[in-house]
Amino acid sequence: MKRIVFLTSLLLAMAMVACSTSKPKATAEGQRPVQLADTQVWQLVSIRGRDVKSQQGVVTLVFRPRTGTFEGKASCNRFWGTYALQHPTNGQDGEVCECRFAQVEATQVVCPDAAMYAEQQLLLLLPKATHILLAPYSITLLQSGRELMKFEMQ
């Protein structure tokens, strides 16, 4: 009996910190939702629902959960800042957390316009994100329920 109480308490505690941990948990369908692990590189695939073309360069994002920071590389510049996730809930498409990106900074190398588009949009939209959807193999940044940017595992 004590073992069941202990295990139940442990499972509840793990569920409460799902968005801040780097250990994945199983979903009802048996899939494992993506967690923000230190080593995972995410590649930008769409901005406001529109595919990002390869001519606009590759934009990547890496979260550092232990320090609450993120970093990334765009076509020409590197960027970084802080983030916070809280209040995880299970949605139809995955786990949704409130998010806040702050202190977003970047180097300022000038590149051709075509290469700069995705980078400029990322730097503009990142601080506007209010929620993050953690789905198997992808993350989507949202504002008021609308997709800002989508990233896939690289």
Image (spheres, helix red, strand yellow):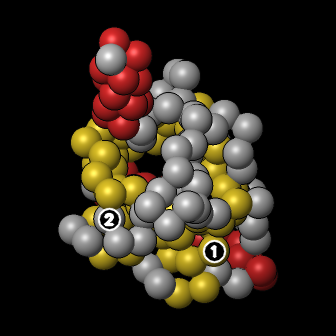
**Which disc number belongs to residue 142?**
none
Q: Is residue 106 left or right of residue 76?
A: left
Q: Is residue 46 left or right of residue 56?
A: left
Q: Residue drawn at (32%, 57%), measured in percent from left and top? A: 90
Label 1 and label 2: CA atoms lie apart by 21 Å
The quarter of the image holding the N terminus is: top left
Q: Residue drawn at (53%, 21%), measured in percent from left and top? A: 67
Q: Is residue 77 left or right of residue 138?
A: right
Quadrant hosting residue 130: bottom left
Q: Examine the rendering and report whether any part of residue 68 can be seen.
A: yes
Which residue corresponds to mark 1?
A: 45
| Towards the viewer: 19 or 115 | 19
Amino acid bearing label 1: Val
Q: Examine the rendering and report whether any part of residue 17 can be seen.
A: no
Image position, residue 2 (x, y; %): 34, 12
Against 101, is 49 above or below?
Answer: below
Which residue corresponds to mark 2?
A: 91
Q: Is residue 77 left or right of residue 132?
A: right
Q: Residue drawn at (47%, 84%), measured in percent from left and top? A: 49
Against 132, is 92 above or below?
Answer: below
Image position, residue 43 (x, y; %): 69, 62
Image position, residue 126 (x, y; %): 43, 55
| Towards the viewer: 128 or 152 | 152
Quadrant hosting residue 28: bottom left
How crowded pointer 1 is (Cα within 10 Å; few <14, some 14-19, many 20+) is rated as many
Quadrant hosting residue 114: bottom right
Element type at mark 2: loop
- Comparing marks 1 and 2, which lies closer to the viewer? 2
| Towards the viewer: 3 or 29 | 3
Residue at the limit of the structure toward the left, as seen here: 144
Amino acid bearing label 2: Gly
